[in-house]
Image (tube, rainbow, N blue to C red):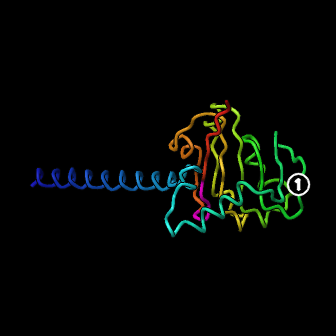
């Protein structure tokens, strides 16, 4: 009888350990559930369902828009009803703490200057106070992989899509 109880305790312990590992792995997987898309790949897609999305993204990335410029943790010039925020990796966290009118912002453009900035971490959940935000556009002047961009983000924000491009200078 004593061996039976010990075997049952071992089985129960193994089951509980298994359940805890599953819970931990699913929690950490959801924290890294950031969809990242290469801008050039997005433009190449010809699927009918993506046509409107592609033209919207292309417009937000390419057109002159009312913009807030935030660099070196300081606000440069900005338009009162901004649609876009242009920033560097050091200033990202200041977007929500500055007294900026961000209610109409649809895109945040983050310009990286070197590969060490790929170690930056951006919390998507901190952007919940930007109700119209749809895109974060990462601009790199060097080769970069999708996984490197994805690793830069923590938290979740289901409204926000992350797009990146590697603009390699000649």
Left/right placement of residue 157 relative to residue 82 reads left
Most foreground residue, 5 or 51: 51
Q: Position of residue 147 (x, y in %)?
A: 50, 43
Above or below, comparing residue 18 to residue 145 in the picture: below
Most foreground residue, 42 or 84: 42
Residue drawn at x 83%, y 61% is 82
Please tell me in which quadrant of the rendered image residue 105 appears: bottom right
Most foreground residue, 45 or 148: 45
Q: Quadrant of the C terminus?
A: top right
Q: Quadrant of the N terminus?
A: bottom left
| Residue 37 highlighted magenta (yes or no) | no
| Secondary structure of residue under mark 1 | strand
Q: Position of residue 103 (x, y in %)?
A: 79, 66
Look at the image and give the residue range highlighted in magenta: 158-162
Above or below, comparing residue 64 to residue 73 in the picture: below
Please tell me in which quadrant of the rendered image residue 8 appears: bottom left
Left/right placement of residue 91 relative to residue 120 reads right
| Within-10-Å neighbours for mark 1: few <14, some 14–19, many 20+ | some
Above or below, comparing residue 114 to residue 105 in the picture: above
Q: Position of residue 100 (x, y in %)?
A: 85, 58
Q: How many marks?
A: 1
Q: Position of residue 91 (x, y in %)?
A: 77, 44
Above or below, comparing residue 127 to residue 143 in the picture: below
Task: Give the prevailing secondary structure in the magenta stretch.
Answer: loop
| Residue that carries the numbered disc 1 in the rendered image | 78
Residue drawn at x 89%, y 62% is 80
Residue drawn at x 64%, y 34% is 168
Q: Residue furthest left?
A: 1
Left/right placement of residue 20 relative to residue 54 reads left
């Amino acid at each position: 009888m004593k061996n039976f109880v010990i075997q049952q305790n071992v089985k129960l312990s193994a089951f509980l350990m298994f359940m805890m590992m599953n819970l931990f792995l699913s929690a950490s997987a959801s924290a890294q559930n950031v969809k990242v898309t290469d801008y050039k790949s997005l433009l190449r897609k010809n699927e009918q369902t993506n046509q409107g999305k592609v033209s919207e993204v292309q417009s937000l990335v390419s057109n002159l828009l009312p913009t807030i410029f935030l660099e070196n943790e300081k606000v440069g010039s900005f338009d009162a009803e901004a649609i876009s925020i242009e920033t560097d990796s050091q200033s990202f966290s200041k977007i929500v703490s500055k007294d900026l009118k961000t209610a109409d912002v649809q895109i945040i453009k983050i310009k990286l200057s070197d590969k060490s900035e790929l170690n930056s971490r951006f919390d998507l959940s901190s952007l919940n106070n930007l109700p119209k935000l749809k895109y974060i556009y990462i601009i790199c002047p060097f080769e970069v992989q999708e996984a490197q961009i994805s690793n830069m983000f923590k938290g979740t924000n289901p409204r926000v899509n992350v797009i990146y491009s590697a603009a390699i200078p000649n």
